[in-house]
Image: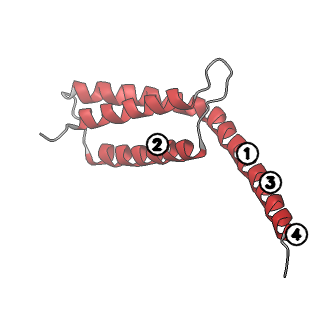
């Protein structure tokens, strides 16, 4: 059985809700996400947003389809929560960028030290 537009939209909303729960810090603590997890979560988010956009562009909503209208309203509410979370998401990504840049500096210094320490014959 193929999922209905409402089912697909509901599943996308549930994934978006899960994304928001995962990236929000709890009680002021960091999220504890790894670079790989952040990358996977944001890739999935972008894919879901694009797929949902295509799904809704293809579907004409009739007045009688109250299930779909209700699900669109719920999805819109979740998108508004995503919009509110954007400053936090930006900060999360900037912290990750700083961490990666610091790690890059550390690795370059270690590499330079290793190169300088090599005994040449």
Quadrant position of residue 14: top left
Proximity of marks 1 and 4: CB atoms separated by less than 8 Å:
no
Q: Quadrant of residue 8?
A: top left
Task: Report the residue marked by disc 1.
Answer: 99
Image x and y of residue 62, in percent: 21, 34
Secondary structure beneath dot 2 equals: helix
Query: Residue at left 85%, top 74%?
Result: 119
> Looking at the image, which is closer to me, 95 or 120?
120
Instruction: Give the Cα distance between marks 2 and 3.
Output: 31 Å
Q: Earlier in the sequence, mark 3 or mark 1?
A: 1
- Residue lying at the far left of the rendered structure: 1
Q: Label 1 near label 2: C-beta < 8 Å?
A: no
Quadrant in the picture for the C terminus: bottom right
Q: Is mark 3 in CB contact (under 8 Å) with mark 1?
A: no
Horizontal side, residue 7 vs residue 86: left or right: left
Decide: is 4 above or below 108. above
The colour scheme is secondary structure
Residue 106 image label: 3
Q: Which mark is residue 45?
A: 2
Identify the residue at image location x=18%, y=27%: 64
Going by the picture, which residue comes out furthest to the front? 121
Whole-angstrom CA distance, mark 3 to mark 1, is 11 Å
Q: Nearer the viewer, mark 4 or mark 2?
A: 4
Task: Give the camera-side residue of 76 and 18.
Answer: 18
């Amino acid at each position: 059985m193929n999922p209905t537009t409402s089912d697909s939209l509901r599943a996308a909303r549930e994934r978006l809700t899960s994304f928001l729960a995962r990236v929000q810090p709890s009680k002021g603590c960091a999220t504890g996400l790894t670079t790989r997890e952040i990358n996977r979560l944001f890739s999935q988010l972008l894919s879901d947003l694009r797929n949902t956009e295509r799904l809704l562009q293809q579907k004409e909503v009739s007045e009688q389809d109250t299930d779909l209208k209700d699900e669109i309203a719920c999805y819109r509410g979740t998108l508004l929560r995503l919009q509110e979370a954007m400053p936090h998401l930006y900060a999360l990504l900037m912290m990750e960028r700083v961490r990666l840049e610091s790690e890059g500096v550390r690795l370059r210094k270690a590499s330079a030290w290793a190169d300088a320490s090599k005994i040449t014959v």
